[in-house]
Amino acid sequence: MLFNSLDFAVLMLATFGLYYLPFLRSFQVVILILSSFVFYAYNQPYLLALLIFSASINTVTSYLTEHFKQKRLFASIGVISNLAILCSFKYSKLLFYTFFHVNTTHSAFADFIISIPLPIGISFFTFQGISLVVDVFRKHESNRFKQMSIERKFIPHLTKTFFFICFFPQLVAGPIVKAHQFLPQIKTKYFHNIDIDHVFRMLVAGYFLKMVVADNLKDQTFWIAYPWFEGLSSTTLIILLFAYSMQIFSDFAGYSLIAIGVASLFGYSLPTNFNFPYIAQSFSEFWQRWHISLSTWLRDYLYFPLGGNRTGVFNTYRNLFLVMFLGGLWHGAAWSYAAWGTWHGLALAVERHFRQDKQKESVIPVKIFKILFVFSFVSISWMFFKLNNFSHVISFVSSVVRNVAIHESWLKIAMCIIYSLPIVGYHLYYLASTKTNALSKRYKFIIYSLMLLCIVLNSGDPGEFIYFQF
């Protein structure tokens, strides 16, 4: 179910209406769980069984980890079970295609592997399940997690766990929520505590980014597809890749803002997922600003447990490459995503090698150069997202090199620039002076009114969110 659909609006109104009724106040969590089931099962009802199965495993293993002595054993079972679910449904085809020739392999096993569906949001809810089990285990080793209460009785624990795993605003595309951040928030909510201004700003900005920017840009970046791009000029191809960089940001950041706004309507706070990533002056800074919930998850549950940067230079680089490789593969069941992660891992490793412990403040021209360099590097890497076949990536690069003499597609270029301008302005706003920030507060009503007007009058054709495939 898409956030920008009439069906979602109906579900939201019904859920919101029931949620704050005084006589149903004690059933708020149950109402949200049932709404989440409807949300997830809307297009693929049979996959709801997998979500319930995953939530059940995490319920049992986290409960056993909390209340029985063999804590490491039960926590390990929980983590392995989540990884097994993720690998079975997401990566079995990739491994099969890698080691077998599909056209020459005919067997019941091959047919079974090929027929395995890719459940929407599986990467997100399995990672949250791992977070729950690990946080419960860490609760007995660190005071940081002490505030995360686990119910003594099984049924209340089951209810809270299902709610944490299945909460529909962030169920299928994040932000990824950690258990120690979310579980303490579960309590009775009241209508008068809603921050209406915050909800309004999140929803308007999110829907603007998705419906006006991303959905209009997707009609142009469609041409970054084999073999269509081979007939376009070099300049057009570069502009289209730039536009795709803007599209993927506005699409995913838009989803995250909508999720944060919807969750706030029900009294729950989700973590910030984007913080002006395209003004980053280094690759490490980019990953502190882009998909923050994933990068911090990988840091806390993979990089640090591997030893982080505390076990010597060689192990530090090994851990860095491994985390980025797996982070890339998390995004999709294709080796192109692993190449994307490795591409970023290489950039981070080179940057770390040459980084000085004490850096002088850069002058403005140097800052601008750094921003443009990092942005260009990141934008080039999005080819691996848009073109999952390596041969198509090579063909795209070849087309950029050889199609210099082809006439420009001025209409495509103009449309890409027009719909990218809001993202450019959004990042320039962040870099602006304090005076400009004060002006934006004075006139924020006008700014949000214009965004609302654009949503009504200039939305593109509705499309799925890019990160739904992950």
Image: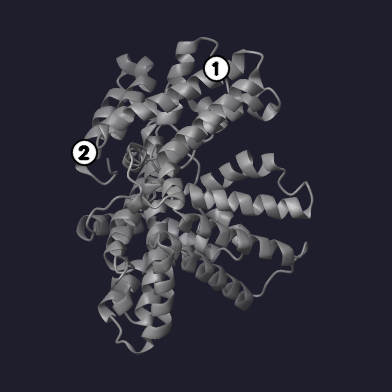
Disc 2: CA contacts within 10 A as few (<14), some (14-19) or many (>=20):
few
**Image mark for residue 131:** none
Disc 1: CA contacts within 10 A as few (<14), some (14-19) or many (>=20):
many
- Tell me the residue that label 1 is attached to: 63
Label 1 sits on what residue type? Tyr
Type of colouring = one colour
Give the structural element (helix, strand or loop) at label 2.
Answer: helix
Q: In the displayed structure, would residue 85 be above or below residue 30?
A: below
What x and y, as percent, mark residue 190?
A: 39, 25
Dividing the picture into quadrants, the one containing residue 360 is bottom right
Q: Residue at x 29, y 87 (%)?
A: 407
Q: In the displayed structure, would residue 321 be above or below residue 393?
A: above
Dividing the picture into quadrants, the one containing residue 50 is top left
Q: Residue at x 51, y 29 (%)?
A: 81
From the viewer's perspective, tell me whether residue 399 is left or right of residue 302.
left
What x and y, as percent, mark residue 398?
A: 42, 78
Real-space Cα separation, disc 2 to disc 1, in angstroms: 36 Å
- Tell me the residue that label 2 is attached to: 7
From the viewer's perspective, tell me whether residue 235 is left or right of residue 427.
left
Observer-nearest of 362 and 97: 97
Label 2 sits on what residue type? Asp
Closest to the camera, between mark 2 and mark 1, is 1
